[in-house]
Structures are given as C-alpha cells and as structure tokens.
Image (tube, grey):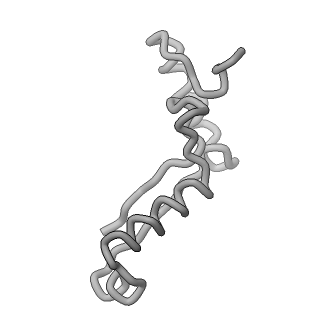
C-alpha cells in the first residue's frame, strides 16, 4: 500500500499549509499515536510518498490545478492576503 501526500498544493490556504516538513511531522505523529514502527510498515509493505508540487517534474500539474481552481473561483493558498 502506498499513502500519497501532496506537498505545496495550492488548494490549501496558508493557514492549513501542507509543506514537506508538515507532512513528515504529521506522519510521525500518526505513527506514534498508533504505535506503528518502521518494521511493521516494511513487513506489511506500507509506504509513504510525499510529492512536492513545487518541484520541476510536477510544475505542469501545479499549473493545471491553479487554472482549475481559478476557473471555479477558488482562492489558492498563494493568493491569501494578496
């Protein structure tokens, strides 16, 4: 199983910012809460994948998300306070 987390998604505003470090902290908090260790994850083939939308391989996806949000009159996180 692969759990996919999207960092720097423009849909979320700055109050709910989900950068890479925030996801890492949240994943660790979840593992601690449920008592899950690395050995359990590996033995059960469970992996976490954080995709940073601000990196070059995903810039086209990021632009499509921003256009779709604009088309639907949704304010992006980078527009908050502007």
**Image location of residue 50, percent across then percent down:** 52, 58
Residue 9, quarter of the rendered image: top right
Of 69 and 37, the residue lying toward us: 37
Residue 76, quarter of the rendered image: top right
Of 4 and 36, the residue lying toward us: 36
Q: Residue at image x 34%, y 79%?
A: 36
Q: Residue at image x 48%, y 10%?
A: 73
**Image location of residue 20, percent across then percent down:** 60, 55
63 relative to 50 in the view: left or right: right
Q: Residue at image x 54%, y 62%?
A: 25
* Quadrant in which the C terminus is drawn: top right
**Image location of residue 22, percent across then percent down:** 57, 54
**Image location of residue 70, percent across then percent down:** 53, 14
Q: What is the tally of numbered marks visible in this picture? A: 0
Q: Residue furthest front?
A: 33
Height in image: 56 above or below 34?
above
Height in image: 35 above or below 11?
below
8 relative to 74 in the view: left or right: right
* Quadrant in which the N terminus is drawn: bottom left
Q: Residue at image x 69%, y 18%?
A: 81
Height in image: 73 above or below 77?
above
40 relative to 79 in the view: left or right: left
């Amino acid at each position: 199983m692969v759990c996919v987390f999207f960092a720097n998604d423009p849909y979320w505003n700055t109050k709910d910012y989900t950068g890479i470090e925030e996801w890492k902290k949240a994943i660790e908090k979840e593992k601690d809460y449920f008592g899950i260790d690395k050995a359990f994850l590996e033995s059960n083939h469970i992996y976490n994948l954080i995709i940073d939308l601000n990196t070059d391989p995903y810039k086209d996806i990021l632009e499509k998300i921003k256009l779709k949000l604009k088309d639907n009159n949704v304010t992006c996180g980078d527009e908050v306070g502007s």
